[in-house]
Amino acid sequence: MDYSADNVEQAVKQFYLNPSLQSEVHFWLTGAQISPDAWSFCWDLMSPNKGIEVQYYGASCLHVKVVRFWHEIPPEQYESLKSKLLQMIVQFASGPKIILTRLCVGLSALVLQLLPDKWPDAIQNLISTFQQEGFAALPTVTRCQILLEVLTVLPEEFFSTNLSQQRRIVLRQELTKGLDHVIPLLQSLLTDESPLEVYQSALKAFSRWVDFGLAIDRAEPIIHQVFTSMRNPHLFDIACDTLVSVFSHPEAYKYPVTIQRILSEILALHDLLSGAIQDEDKETSEGICRVIVALSENHTKLIVESVLGPEDVKLNTTSLLHMILACSGLPGHFPVDECCSDHTFTFWYLLQDELGMISEEDFSPLMEVFKPIFFSLIDVLLVKARHPPEADYSSWSLEEKEKFRCYRQDIGDTLMYSYNILGVELLAQLVNCLVNVVDKYKQGNQDWQNVEAILFVFSSISESVPADEKVYVSKLFAQLRQIPFANSQQISTALHMIGSFAEWMQWHPETLGYVLPLVLQGISNPEVGTAATIALKDITRENLTNIQPYAHQILMACQNCFEANVLKSRDLLRLMSSVGHILSVLSPIEIMQYLNQMITPHIEHLISLAAVQPSPSVRADVYTSVNIFAWLFGSLDTELDGKDEEQQHELQIKRLQQQDPSEPKPIYVILDKISPAIQKIAYAWIFDTGIIEAVCDLYKKALQKLDNDFAPLSGDLTQLVINLYQRCPNTAVIDLCKQMLLIFGLQENFIPFSKVIVGNICSRSLSLFDLSVRNFTDVIEGFMCFLAQVMKKLKKIILDCNCDLTAIFHAAVLSMSLPEHATVKAACSFVIEFLTAGAENEVIKSIVITYGHVLVDRIMRAIGGECQRGIIDFIADVIMTLNKHYVTQLSLWLKTVVENEGYPSPRASKQDKENFIKNLLRDRMNKRRTRDVVKEFTLLCRGLLGTEYAEAAAVLL
């Protein structure tokens, strides 16, 4: 079907009327849009008698043609195109607005194409044009609005159009010249006499030209006019948006003197802000807050310096800081009652960061001003962090509750930064506040939310508290015992706070006696089980040196909790991790006594599950049961590598005196008991990725802890992983195999197993390449990582196991073409190891020499544009390895690049390719230079070299 106006009109109608054909019609309409016929039919589609959808498509076609297919129109038609477009704008002057806007965008694109040679002084000419005969018939307000619409979209079009760097420089210069005419026009329209709709359009245009680069000092008169317009309710929203754009501009910081003058306008908004807060006018208070924060965020350095300036400047700055505090403390609960206080968090972070860079001589006078401000901020945020009354909170939506949770986290981060300014003085204030609030709470004069908020704040700043602080945190934990906890939220926050100080407790072990009773009480309560088990896990992990006196108490509480079976699965796993930490500090005899007592029920349950047929009803139980042992193995460490050398030495001596050398390690004893059940579960659930991952994780952790002591079980595990992988290839199985090989691979009695593992993994993985390889990219990635490690550390094994190295090489080359970055990176890592090994091994070298041209072809196709740019560095590293070990062959292989026209990209000329090869071979030992050469050539092949987009892409690459 040809691209006639009638056919296109029918297609547009079908697109909107027949959803089932939308994809097909969209494809056809896209073809119509880029065809040369669009230059003619676009005007027909904008006829007054056409539907609005058809007219919009016609206007969009015109814009696309001007932007992307400008080369299709001969220069002698430029003037007629301009006249025709202006006439069309007049036709749609009264609407529809969507068509008029699209035509204005098209006119802006035309301006950018014709500047500066074909339409000099285009902006001045446009302003004049809208005052001439062709537009005289239009009402003055309409003419102003159309002109302002064009001036609004012109800077937007400048930023959205893909331009070369040189062209962008030229256009920026021309548009900057146009500001000489734009500024007076806007000033003349931003007056009380202007109609409301004109004033709004002028504000919007001004905002876009500020984004373009209108300097604040040059725009100052208009900025004052914008502040004035904030007093008009009809202009308030757009005035706020405009000022936010002004103050958020990246170059606004260059005009501190102008900002100081404008600051008076900000301070003049105080009465408006106070009135809005008092009247509960959310829209007005949030708009003013946005303006205040936009100015403050971008001028923290100026704010800090101003405090050291003249008294009037210092006073203004202090007033601004109090206004920001007011914005941080807007009444009500976020996000239901207000949605703006969170905007201030970035400012407080930037301010403390700025204060952290001041000189010592300025420190004291600055702190006289800023410490009271930050103390006030603490008071404000303590209020904002409070939970709403339970009746209100229960009516909130899930989204509102999640936003409030994130908001509290941001409050916590802000308070953590405040510690950098206030130090232990912050702790002193919080402890005093807690004491007072708890006293009132016990008397019934305070809500539980006030206590909970203070505990939450303590948990937020815990990471900043130094280990040698022994006054205020100790008082905190002493005070903790005085709190009559009212509900699960309050208890959970207290438990999180306790866990956050786990590392600090390592240096203050007396605190453990205060906190462990509350934590152990919490683990048996399902409502606070998550917080309690997290706290216990952190405490036991960080306090191995001091936890032994409490070991029996903790282990018995854990056993009671296991028997009660009231916790969630994840909480049970954390609890088992804590058990492992505690057992790690006991003697071998004690460990086995507790294990026999606590773990036997879990072993029996696992064995019973192994006898059950797989079904959805038992899947979660199986998964948790396997993970219980994995988490135990992960934390039970009889070597205690985490202790310092002296403590570890003392513990080892004690254990050697108590342990029979012939006795196996506890993990081995457990693993020996559960291995038959684990293997049954693995075979039964072989197609369940989650359970297989849990099984592999269990064995990996056992391997890490047992090391060579695992050897007696290695044969059975070898058979298991081979069978699992043969039936259902899985990355978790590959990772487990890799760990087995790294531990035992070259041990004489394990070498036969090593060869079997490598041989089976390779043969089964290679079979995936006969299928749809894109369905197995995760497995391919794991396989390539496996090969890279084996080739690097166990080269003898892979050479002696009768693997098809040629097929493996071809598989790696094919993997380099897959879309996933991680898979390509893994493939390139293996190829590099393979190429490097070829320098010493004749078999591998022969394969590379015979099939190296296939690899080079894959590399060049990737560079030419077949692969995403993000993998180019990996490709460049492969080239460098070829360049290092096979430079002669590489030179021959690269000849095809020059000889084949259009290869690897039609955009690369023969000279471009010769230069590329020359630069590659010249800088063959320089990794950074090789990468740069490849990046430059791939941008050339993709048609991006020299564009502004390419500069940004090059940084990312």
Image (tube, helix red, strand yellow):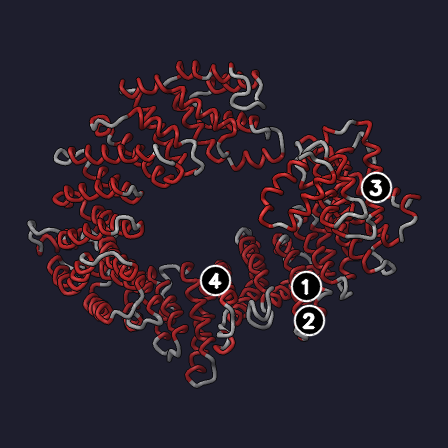
Q: Is residue 892 above or below residue 658?
A: above
Callout 2: 10 Å neighbours few (<14), some, many (20+)? some
Q: Is residue 270 left or right of residue 300?
A: right
Spatial separation of the CA atoms under disc 4 and disc 3: 54 Å
Residue 884, above or below 280: above
Q: Element type at marker 3?
A: helix
Compute the Cα span from label 4 to label 1.
25 Å
Mark number, residue 736: none
State how far apart marks 3 and 1 are (Cα): 40 Å
Q: Quadrant of residue 512?
A: bottom left
Q: Which residue is mark 3?
A: 86
Q: Disc 4 designates what residue?
A: 409
Residue 814 in sight? yes
The CA distance from mark 3 to mark 2 is: 45 Å
Residue 739 image offset from top left, x and y in percent: 25, 41
Which sits in the foreground, 386 or 443? 386
Is there CB contact under 8 Å for labels 3 and 1?
A: no
| SS label for mark 1 | helix
**Is the N terminus in the top left, top right, bottom left or bottom right quadrant?**
top right
Q: Where is mark 2, residue-wise?
A: 276
Give how far across and how far down residue 675 sits, in percent.
16, 51
Residue in view at x 88 percent, y 42 percent: 129
Picture mark count: 4
- Contact between marks 3 and 2 (CB within 8 A): the answer is no
Amino acid tagged 1 = Ile
Find residue 581 and report its horizontal and vertical position in percent: 24, 58
How far separated are the C-alphas under marks 1 and 2? 9 Å
| In the foreground, 228 or 368 | 228
Q: CA distance from mark 2 to mark 4?
A: 27 Å
